[in-house]
Structure formats: C-alpha cells, structure tokens
Amino acid sequence: MADISTKLPAKGGPAGLSGYPFNTLRREIDRFFDDFGGRGWRLPFDWSLFSQLPAAESLVYTPAIDVAEKKDAFEITAEVPGMEEKDIEVKLANGCLSIRGEKKSDREEKSANYYLSERNYGSFNRYFPLPNGVDAEKISASFKNGILTVTLPKTVEAQETEKKIPITGK
C-alpha cells in the first residue's frame, strides 16, 4: 500500500488554473484552428454559448437584384418581400443611383401559458454607377408586390450608337 505521506495534493498548475494540462492543450488546439481558418472550425467545441450566435455580417439583409440592358433602357429589379413602398428610397447623386431600404417587423403573442415578442430589423443600401448614355432626368421607379423596378432610359444618341458588324469567312 502506498505511503500517505508521499502523496502530493493536486495543484491547478501555473497561476492556479484548474485542469492545467488540459487547458493548455485546449488553448493550443484553439490557436491552431484560429490560424488555420478562423473560428468556424471549432464552433461545435467552443465553451461560450454566445459564440454560437450568427456573426453580425450574416444578419445583414441584402435583396436579390437583377440588372438588365434593353434596347431603350437599363432596368434594375430588386426583390424586397415584406417591404412597402414607404420603406424604400431611390436617389440619384454624383452619377450614382442608390437604393436604400429598411425592413421592420414586430410580432407579439400573449397566451395563458406564454408570452412571445419578436422584433426583426434589417436595412440595405446598394449603389450603382450610371452607365454612359442614361437620361438622368427620365429615371423612374415603380413598386408592386414586393418588386422594385428602376428604369434608366437611354438617350437617343445612346440608342443609335449600336451598329451591327457583319461576319465574313476567310
């Protein structure tokens, strides 16, 4: 049987850290994954509950936008479901078209067993440099069923500059 006088009490390691060898190993592994590719690698093993919340950049709302060129105009279409016309602003300044919007929703439910309150907010701001040949005075915007359409009419000169080049075989 082992002599009781020869046993030493367990220490927390340097600076009194509990579980010293394991904490050191954990810090080294965390550092390795941070150096390798960021925090995403170790999320399932992270101790902090709050580190598992989505990053702030994933909470940013960005609508799907299409830009098309037609014979007489450019057309920008933005899908903004759940938004109303009053929530969207279209401006032209310094040769740049900006489309800005803010989406807000509040939900509240009360019952005998629970109370639910949710608030969601998101905003976006997109900028588009005006292409050459756009008649800035005739730009228009329309909104219907969650779709914003901004029409940028071409000047007469811009519509006439197109020339078809014949292809010949040699």
Image (spheres, rainbow, N blue to C red):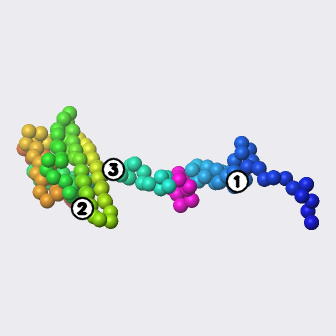
Alpha-carbon distance for marks 2 and 3? 53 Å
- The residue at 64%/50% (across/down) is 27
Span of residues in magenta: 37-48
Instruction: Residue 83: name its quadrant.
Output: bottom left
Alpha-carbon distance for marks 1 and 2? 80 Å
Instruction: For residue 21, say whether it is visible.
Output: yes
- The residue at 11%/48% (across/down) is 141
Alpha-carbon distance for marks 1 and 3? 40 Å
Q: Nearer the viewer, residue 150 or 103?
A: 103
Q: Position of residue 53 (x, y in %)?
A: 44, 54
Q: Position of residue 69 (x, y in %)?
A: 17, 53
Q: Position of residue 38 (x, y in %)?
A: 53, 51
Q: Nearer the viewer, residue 133 or 13?
A: 13
Dot 1 amino acid type: Gly
Q: Nearer the viewer, residue 105 or 28?
A: 105
**In what element is the residue under mark 3?**
loop
Give the labeled residue for mark 1. Answer: 19
User: In the rendered structure, are the residues bearing label 1 and label 2 in contact, judged by CB atoms less than 8 Å apart?
Assistant: no
Give the labeled residue for mark 2. Answer: 169
Relative to 31, is 143 on the left or the right?
A: left
User: Which dot marks residue 92?
Assistant: none
Instruction: For residue 157, say whether it is visible.
Output: no
User: Is residue 141 shown in magenta?
Assistant: no
